[in-house]
Structure formats: structure tokens, C-alpha cells
Amino acid sequence: MAISVDDAVPGPVTRSSARARRGSTGRVRSGIEIVLLAVLIGSLLFPVVWMLQTSIKTGQDIYAVPAKFFGFDVTLQHYKDVFVAPGGGRSDLSGSFLNSVIVAGSSTALATLLGVPAAWAYSRFTLKAKKDQLFFILSTRFMPPVVVVIPIFLMYRELGLIDTKLGLVLVYTAFNLPFTIWMMKGFVDEVPSEYEDAAMLDGYTRLQAFRKFTLPLLIPGIAATAVFALIFSWNEFVYAIFLTSSQEVRTAPPAIAGLIGGTTVNWGLVAASAVVFALPVLIFAYLVRKHLVAGVTLGAVRR
């Protein structure tokens, strides 16, 4: 069979064919990335979905074998048990949630109230061994809570702060304050000091210039810092379990952990308690979402 020259020698690769090959390769790569991302998101959200389903299942459906993902009976009795005791009245869990709100909210507010002026002072003033002081402040967060809980317990026993809300507020504030100072110092550094200098030329004192001109610009940073401080105080377990013993003072994390034990576990009540426990932080983060995004990205682009 005779072969022509055109059949033996391939023609030149045109720009359109190369673009088509690159386009097909890009589509395949995008498809693989989408599949991997979907698998990752599914694996991350599966425990959350399972917790939500368990909180609204009946006891029979919770222990069903094989597990029921669909077609189960829906009930809100577990959420009622979170707030209402079996004999009527307020349940112990609802009191623990209220204690968490008081302790976490107070410690976050106190850490913010003390940390923002301290961060401003470290940013604006020249101090002796300022870097060493900042490192010492940060070093208080190096050790995990379980390492220092025994010395704190002994100090609290001498001061009469064991099993008190004030004791939890103080220890949470002490551990949130270094984080607040370091976070807010970065935000204060991004605000030009010339604003305060110009205000002082107009007759304002330094504190007035800080309050009227610098502080409003720090609201995104304060919101971002407050969210992280609230999350630490809200989720903290070690101090809450070691420094409290009565139901009147105990916060939600050890109270929920106390539901797991014995011969039988009411997993519906545990799941409903976990859902209710997660809601306040999610609501707070949603309310400050605009400031949170601005605070997290503040300083990412240098001017």
C-alpha cells in the first residue's frame, strides 16, 4: 500500500488544537479537585450531621442496627430534657449553660478591657526591654492547662476561690489576656500613630485621642480577638473540672461530659446538649462576621 508524504509526516500543531488539549486537561484537573474537595467536606461535616440526627431521633432509632440515616421518627424531647428536669422545673444542664454564659462572657469582656489598652501602650510607647516583656507575656501560654492546674488549685484553695464563678473568670482572663495583647498589638501597629499626633495638636489628650480616633478603627480587630477568646473560655474543660465541684458553679463542658458514664448513656440527650452548647458561639461569630473577616485580614496587604 502506498503512503503519501502527508500521511507519513504529521502537520504542524495549530494554536487551536493546543488550546483544546490544555482546556481538556484543565477540566480533568478541576473535576478531580472538586471530587477531592467534596470528599473532604463530607468527611468533616459527617460528625456534625450525625450529631444533629441523633439529637432528633427517638431512643429506638438511635440504637437501631443498621443505623438509620433516613426514615427515622423525629422528636424534640431531647432538647426539652436539656432545659426541663424530668420532674419539672429547670434542669441541671440549663444551669450549667447559664454558668458558661456568665463565666465566658465576663472573662472575654475583662480580657478585652485590659488587653486593648495594654496592646496600645506596647505599640505606641518606648519601654525598657519591651520585647522581653512581650515574650514573657506570651510565655504564659506555652504550657498546657493540665500542667499548671495543680498550682492554681493550691493557690485558689488558700484564697477561697475553689468552686466559685469568680475563680473561673479570673483564671480564664489570665489565660486570655496574653493572647489578647499579642493579637491587638498587631492591629494597633497597623493604625498610623499620626492620627493621634494630629488629635493632640488639636488639644486632645493622648487618652482622648486613643478613644476618639484609634479605638473606632480597632473594632474589627477587637471583634476577631473577642471571638477567639470567647471560644477558649466557652470550650475550656480542664480548669472547669478541677476548680469546680458543685452543680451550681459547674459550666457546660464538664456537665455534658458527666452525661457519658454508667451502664446506659442517653445519646440523644448528649447530642442535643452538644448542639445547644455550640449555638451561642456560632451566633456570636455570625453577628460580628463583618468585623471578624476585616479583623482577620487586617494587615495582610502592606500599603
Image (cartoon, rainbow, N blue to C red):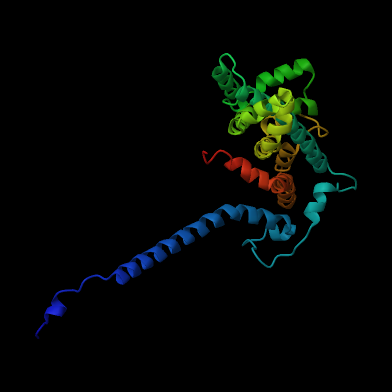
Residue extending furthest toward the bottom: 1
Residue extending furthest toward the right: 88
Residue extending furthest toward the left: 2
Residue at 47% from the left image edge and 58% from the top image edge: 36
| Residue 7, position as x, y percentages in the image | 16, 79
- Residue 243 seen in the current view: no
Residue 185 higher or lower than 269, as above or below? above
Horizontal side, residue 79 vs residue 193: left or right: right
* Between 3 and 5, the one nearer to me in the picture: 5
| Residue 60, position as x, y percentages in the image | 72, 60
Residue at 73% from the left image edge and 23% from the top image edge: 205
* Between 166 and 199, the one nearer to me in the picture: 199
* Between 44 and 246, the one nearer to me in the picture: 44
Horizontal side, residue 253 vs residue 12: left or right: right
Could you say which quadrant of the image residue 255 lies in? top right
Q: Quadrant of the N terminus?
A: bottom left
| Residue 230, position as x, y percentages in the image | 70, 37
Residue 145 higher or lower than 105, as above or below? above
Residue 86 higher or lower than 60, as above or below? above
Residue 133 higher or lower than 56, as above or below? above
Residue extending furthest toward the top: 128
Horizontal side, residue 145 vs residue 81: left or right: left
Residue at 52% from the left image edge and 41% from the top image edge: 301
| Residue 104, position as x, y percentages in the image | 74, 35
